[in-house]
Image (spheres, rainbow, N blue to C red):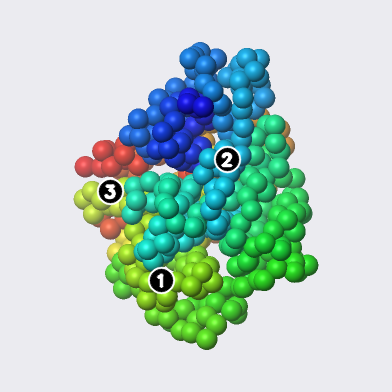
Amino acid sequence: MKKIHLIAACGTGMGTLACILKEMGYSISGSDQNVYPPMSDFLNEKGIQLFAGYDPANLDPRPDLVIIGNAVTRQNVEAQAVLQKGIPYISMPQAVNRFIAKDKKIILVTGTHGKTTTASIMAHILYTAGMDPSFMIGGILKDFNSSFRIGSGDYMVIEGDEYDTAFFDKGPKFMHYDPDITLMTGIEFDHADIFTDIDHIKAVFSRFVKKIEKKSHIIAFDNNDNLKEILSGSTAAIETYGDRAQWFFSNHTQKESTTFFNVHGPGKQISIETHLIGQHNLLNCLACMAAAHRIGITDTLVSRALKTFSGIKRRQEIRGVKHGITVMDDFAHHPTAVKETIKAVKPFYKNGRVIAVFEPRTNTSMRNIFQSVYPDAFLDADMVCICEPNIKKNIREQEKFSTLKLVADIEKNGVEAYHFKNSNRVIHFLVSKLSAGDLVLIMSNGGFDNIHVRLLEMIE
């Protein structure tokens, strides 16, 4: 096997896999309908041939294997060509197990929120401790300028997604892995295109817990009732972190760009410094510290790792500062993530306004499931700009999310809010309103028409 082609190569997981396989010596090509930075730039930097759009011609010359991402439907013209030509194909998790993780002890990070950040912190702790880890994470770690690493050590950190695997395998991705340690950050409703309700999601996580219960040490967030429910029948060894858990933090203070807090664990207290901000990120640190303690990494090395961790691209990432105006990019899209992100950055911009710019473009946020929940997510913002997403989904009219209603409901909460048809209008509006000291917090799980760079260019 020499040539491998990936369909939907610009997804974070698929793009990461493409780079790993390229580094392992395979000839790699990929295709995607949505080719945008940072993943498109990352793939190009790694020398991976990337086709914009799906076409059977992308399979010439014929690859030895095709990896099909979960964003690809059976009707996809390129996928149909794979089936018609009889080219061998597998899913992304199957490829990870086959090529990368088969001889590793897997640390699997699962949950609705915080997977990317938690997995990244865990990988950095292992690396700082000299354990030469491998990792495959749905975001680009600034310390490595990569979303992956292939090390010679025993451990591999994997971000475990509950989303379905592929059109030919409707089970969740994380069911494919056999973890040594599992971090569970909590369960909320998401992915409305494949899950009917919260009970459906809980059933999937419950099957996962039962599958791993005799083989995996579980470290779970204690302040989530849904997670507590699915873990109640488990016979596995479970450690908890949270407010009144086995691992908790106290004395949380912030000074400029540094967060200080104390961590309390079984028989220990550790003073921590980190550049991460927000209580949600401190909880992510707790989960990783519990795992590090389980592995046997010293408190000194853990403290050093958290102090030197630089973060992840698209997670509270400052894209630029111009004339005292800061433009920040964040992946937040679920109402809980939006709320926690605004709450986290607010204390750092007391001399200006926090202006939240939100594009509800996920399969869940484009449905009216959280219509009544989203307004409260913006309570800590000084101004909110809601932009119509630049993609269309096949959603029944009675199920569609109303951006106009969201703006009206935010205003009812006493927060200044505006509605926009496209990103161009957002940019022109902001340029006329911004002043020194303001933070523009742009939240979307997509490229958002490269709004961050375009806004910075327009500010004069």
Which mark is first along the chain, 1 or 3? 1
Would you call the spot at circle 1 few (<14 residues within 10 Å), some (14-19), or many (20 or more)? Answer: many
Residues at badges 3 and 2 in contact (C-beta under 8 Å)? no
Residue 348 seen in this snapshot:
no
Residues at badges 2 and 1 in contact (C-beta under 8 Å)? no
Would you call the spot at circle 2 few (<14 residues within 10 Å), some (14-19), or many (20 or more)? Answer: few
Task: Please tell me whether residue 450 is drawn above or below residue 341 in the rendered image.
Answer: above
Q: Secondary structure at mark 1?
A: helix
Mark 1 highlights which residue? 302
* Residue shown at 61% from the left, 57% from the top: 179
* Residue shown at 61% from the left, 20% from the top: 87
- From the viewer's perspective, tell me whether residue 315 is left or right of residue 395: left
Q: Identify residue type, mark 2.
A: Arg
Mark 2 highlights which residue? 98
Looking at the image, which is closer to me, 9 or 24? Answer: 24
Q: Identify residue type, mark 3.
A: Gly
Q: Secondary structure at mark 2?
A: helix
Which mark is first along the chain, 2 or 3? 2
Residue 103 seen in this snapshot:
yes
- From the viewer's perspective, tell me whether residue 408 is left or right of residue 210: left
Would you call the spot at circle 3 few (<14 residues within 10 Å), some (14-19), or many (20 or more)? Answer: some
The image shows residue 63 at horizontal and vertical percentages of: 52, 21
The image shows residue 60 at horizontal and vertical percentages of: 49, 14
Mark 3 highlights which residue? 320
In space, the residues marked 3 and 1 are separated at their CA atoms by 30 Å
